[in-house]
Image: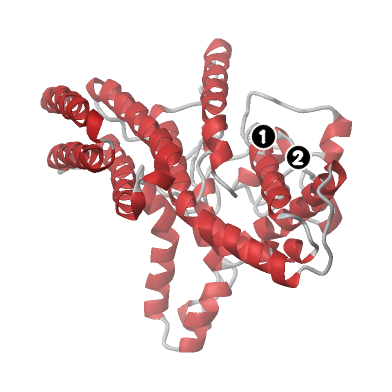
């Protein structure tokens, strides 16, 4: 749950995504859609930005429980790490399973399921808040006396393992492997909205937990991916918040406070009798067209350039986060999040995108120069010239391309 290891993994993520894309092209299989993949990655960028703030709460909570309430103290050895990994993986199974069973957790986790494609970029489509909401489930681990560094190292391994299982490029692994370990086939089931696949295969590394606790399902028919009520948006913020908005709307229709409060921990689909009772997921139409509004081809290059710049901004933000101070930490969090949302709006061709994008570019220039003036004074002149040149180029490119469109 400590995000810094992701910083070093980013180049490998993009390399793997590029190889998967190239393999799909070679085999004549469309693993990727530009708009969906960019949205997946933008949501992942937001997840990492918020993780930088959440890490203080999560590390602090773990360390506090470890230092004050640990029953025993585990030695810092390879074997204690392996034991911690297995225990962590079991708790992850239950956290994941409960994230499909309790509305307040599903509201955060649903973002990971809302892509209608299945590829390596989906692995990076992670909630902005889920770790903060579900962390309490893992607190028995510090009670068992595992050092915080061992705990977070185990969490990093579990997170990184799950990247490679988000692919259709790998059909099946050897049978012995799939009996014990999670695999692309098993995890495709988890992302399917077919009735037989819903709420199955919650494991991270060891699929044995699903076999033991009755949630295992073998892959049969090709899964239909997404959620039962499609998101139909490229907005990363809405992807993270839409389910809570639906919960709030449902609460407004309820007359009893008991029902309003119960909705928070109820199973997704639950409603009180006055609103018709439990609403089963609607039937899945495997042939239903995917949400796929296309920006004019003239804008694809601009969108790709913006994604590259946002990613470089994320890397710089993560690298220098501790030295820029709270004001700029919050300011650039806002800029990065707004940037990903405007990219989504451009792909949806919202009518206000030209004004919003120019204002965003101005805000980026002012913020960067303010930061360099106060923190990196010797480089201020360089940043001023470079940012003004970049602004002129990007603003001209965007305005001309939107006029052509």
Q: Is 321 on the left-hand or right-hand side of 143?
A: left
Mark 1, other Cα within 10 Å: few <14 / some 14–19 / many ≥20? many
**Residue sitting nearer the eye, 75 or 287:** 75
Mark 2, other Cα within 10 Å: few <14 / some 14–19 / many ≥20? many
The tally of labels here is: 2
Q: Is 151 on the left-hand or right-hand side of 279?
A: right
- Residue at left offset 84%, top offset 41%: 78
- Residue at left offset 42%, top offset 82%: 254
- Residue 289 showing in the rendered view: no
Marks 1/2: CA–CA distance: 8 Å
Query: Considering only vertical position in the picture, is 365 above or below 398?
Result: below
- Residue at left offset 46%, top offset 88%: 257
Q: What is the x, y in percent for residue 388?
A: 14, 27
Q: What is the x, y in percent for residue 308?
A: 36, 27
Q: What is the x, y in percent for residue 348?
A: 28, 39
**What element does badge 1 sit on?**
loop
> What coloring was used for the rendering?
secondary structure
Query: Considering only vertical position in the picture, is 258 above or below 54?
Result: below
Q: In which quarter of the image is residue 353?
A: top left
**What element does badge 2 sit on?**
loop
Q: Is 380 on the left-hand or right-hand side of 264?
A: left
Q: What residue is disc 2 on? A: 182
**Residue sitting nearer the eye, 166 or 390:** 390
Q: What is the x, y in percent for residue 93?
A: 72, 54
Which label's residue is closer to the chain start, 1 or 2?
1
Tag 1–tag 2 contact (CB < 8 Å): yes
- Please tell me the numbered disc located at residue 165: 1
**Residue sitting nearer the eye, 344 or 27:** 344
């Amino acid at each position: 749950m400590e995000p810094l290891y992701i910083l070093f993994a980013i180049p490998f993520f993009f390399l793997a995504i590029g190889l998967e894309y190239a393999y799909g092209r070679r085999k004549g299989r469309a693993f990727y859609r530009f708009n969906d993949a960019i949205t997946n990655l933008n949501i992942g960028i937001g997840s990492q930005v918020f993780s930088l703030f959440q890490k203080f709460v999560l590390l602090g909570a773990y360390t506090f429980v470890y230092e004050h309430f640990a029953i025993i103290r585990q030695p810092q050895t390879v074997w204690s790490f392996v034991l911690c990994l297995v225990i962590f993986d079991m708790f992850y199974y239950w956290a994941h399973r409960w994230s499909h069973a309790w509305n307040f957790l599903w509201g955060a986790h649903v973002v990971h399921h809302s892509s209608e494609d299945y590829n390596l970029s989906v692995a990076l489509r992670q909630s902005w808040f889920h770790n903060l909401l579900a962390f309490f489930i893992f607190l028995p681990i510090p009670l068992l006396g595992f050092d915080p560094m061992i705990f977070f190292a185990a969490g990093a391994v579990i997170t990184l393992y799950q990247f490679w299982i988000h692919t259709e490029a790998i059909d099946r692994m050897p049978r012995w492997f799939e009996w014990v370990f999670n695999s692309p086939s098993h995890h495709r089931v988890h992302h399917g909205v077919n009735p037989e696949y819903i709420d199955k295969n919650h494991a991270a590394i060891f699929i044995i937990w699903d076999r033991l606790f009755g949630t295992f399902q073998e892959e049969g028919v090709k899964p239909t991916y997404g959620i039962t009520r499609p998101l139909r948006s490229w907005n990363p913020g809405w992807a993270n918040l839409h389910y809570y908005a639906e919960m709030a709307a449902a609460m407004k229709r309820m007359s009893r406070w008991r029902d309003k409060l119960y909705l928070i921990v109820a199973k997704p689909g639950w409603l009180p009798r006055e609103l018709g009772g439990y609403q089963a997921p609607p039937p899945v139409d495997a042939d239903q067209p995917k949400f796929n509004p296309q920006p004019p081809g003239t804008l694809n290059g601009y969108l790709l350039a913006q994604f590259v710049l946002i990613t470089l901004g994320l890397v710089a933000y993560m690298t220098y986060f501790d030295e820029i101070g709270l004001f700029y930490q919050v300011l650039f969090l806002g800029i990065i999040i707004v940037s990903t949302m405007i990219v989504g709006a451009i792909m949806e061709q919202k009518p206000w995108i030209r004004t919003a994008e120019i204002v965003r570019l101005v805000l980026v220039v002012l913020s960067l120069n303010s930061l360099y003036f106060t923190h990196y004074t010797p480089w201020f002149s360089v940043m001023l010239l470079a940012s003004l040149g970049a602004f002129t180029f990007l603003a001209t490119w965007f305005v001309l391309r939107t006029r052509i469109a």
